[in-house]
Image (cartoon, grey):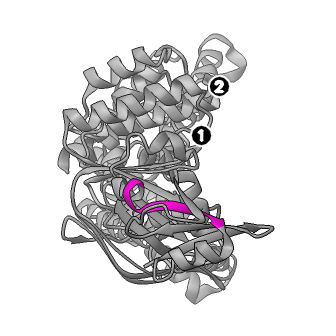
Amino acid sequence: MIELKNVTKEYGRTVALNDFSITIGQPGIYCLLGRNGAGKTTLLKTIAGHIAATSGAVMVNGKAVDMLAMPDDVFFVETGAAQFNIRLTDLFSAAAKINPAFDMDFAREMARRFDLDMKKRFKQLSFGMKAMASTLIALSSGREILILDEPVLGFDPVMRKVFYELLQESCAVKSRTVIVSTHIIDEIEKVAEQLMIIDKGQLKLYCDINEVDEKAYSVIGSAEYVKAATEGLNVIGETSAGGFLSQYIYDKRIDAGEGYDLSSLNLQDFFIAIVGGEKEALQ
Amino acid sequence: MKESVIGMAKVNWKNSKTAWLITAVIFLSAGVAYYIMAIFIDYFLGDVIALGNFLYAAPLFLAIFVPAQNFSKLMHLGGNRKNFFRSALITYVPVAAGASLVSILTHMILDALLTSAGMIGSSLDLLNGFGFMEHGSVVAFFQMTVFLLFVSCAAHTLTLIQGHWYGWVCDGLIIAVICVFTPIEPLRGALVWFWNMAIFHEYAIVQIVFCLVLALAIYAASLVPIKSKRI
């Protein structure tokens, strides 16, 4: 279980996390979304003990996290992580020495599926392959909590597809919590179970990803009908053109009526409405 | 936890190529090459620096490159700072002991053989210079090991504190001690006392305990920079 209570992280005058609280209990794949500079990496590094919170408490499985007492249950993979420039087979062996529960068979099998040349040295790999090697080490580490910061950056579409399949397989093999931060929303929504949206250092939304399908939709029609239909609902954004208005709703479903239509809101549109919209009325 | 710490030490030994390479270059170019010339060319017949002394570079450079080069990479392989702190000491101890052991063996076997055969004049050896061999080879082994460990711990902590304000203060203090203490008679006495305790003390046990305590104290201080070191 991961618990953050009133965590604030400041870099000089910049507040990266602002009184941030969250509890991540159930194992599963968690999708972390946020705009650039929203505080995603800071949040992930704080959980992993890579950086220290300015104030507040971070707990992993009941143990307080700080930079010295980095949690043993967490494996954090960051973009562009430096590794020893040795053959991948040796790199995996090194990882196995540091992580006693390392699953070498799983690592080799995944490397084979990704066409990773185990004889190549780390620096001989492309950017995407380097990220893949680091991610494979994390997935094979046997840790209960995996934190992947932009893992698919540099992956081609085929690699991304295989990666998400492996992520699900890895979670099936061992019950674990995987937090994935990404900007490629339409792909992660297929595998993620929980959704976290962070904006300006604050948690904007934390819910089951199915809730978005159920509760997020847009109401489109002439402005006066739309406004009347959505009165009392949680409007998270809107756009208008001429006399027409589109309002993005995150609330209970209504039925289509005279003068307006309903349409589903996919996760990307929903995310944009929340963090990029003018309205910030999410409840 | 224990497995992970020892695993990290093993990874350090295997992936400290820069330290091993520098030691090998020094050992081969300054040590072995000079021995070969001394043996085969009469012109060089005279005193040579004992071959084993060049191996002392290994614990020194290892203690510089482990925190400087390996730290972040170990973290990216799933290590953590606390285990790094524990494993680095485990990394240095066998290397200090190994360098000390090989040095004593070359002193007792190779140097003695070449000297008695007249192939080299005599070997200049820190084991003699420090007076360790006066206590017998076994005691000398422990004396040299703890001294090298002290050097390793000092290098480790000094490497880690660079970039911090207290690192600059410490560098300044070391320079000040060398520059100020040496020319001033009473302060020079303090330096003499220090080196007497760390190296030249007539009782080997005093030197061993002093080096060990000092090494561990300096090493413990490295916890502060490790705690805040960027990954």
Q: Is residue A195 above or below residue B214?
A: above
| Front-most of residues B33 and B121 | B33
Question: Predominant secondary structure in magenta?
Answer: strand
The amino acid on which the numbered mark 1 sits, given as a three-letter code, is Leu
Say which residue label 1 marks: A153
**Element under disc 1:** loop
Q: Say left or right for A90 vs B5.
A: right
Given the image, on which type of amino acid does mark 2 rest?
Ser
Q: How far is disc 2 from disc 1 in space, using C-alphas?
A: 46 Å
Query: In this view of the protein, can residue A191 be seen by the observer?
Result: yes
Report in which chain the residue with disc 2 lies: B
Q: Are marks 2 and 1 on the same chain?
A: no
Q: For the magenta stretch, what is the residue range?
A: A213-221
Q: Residue furthest top?
A: B40
Q: Give the labeled residue for mark 2.
A: B29
Residue B91 sits above or below residue A272 on the image = above
Residue A49, how many percent across, how many down?
Answer: 39, 64
Tell me where residue B111 appears, x and y as whole percent: 44, 26
Write the residue at 65% across / 70% down: A238
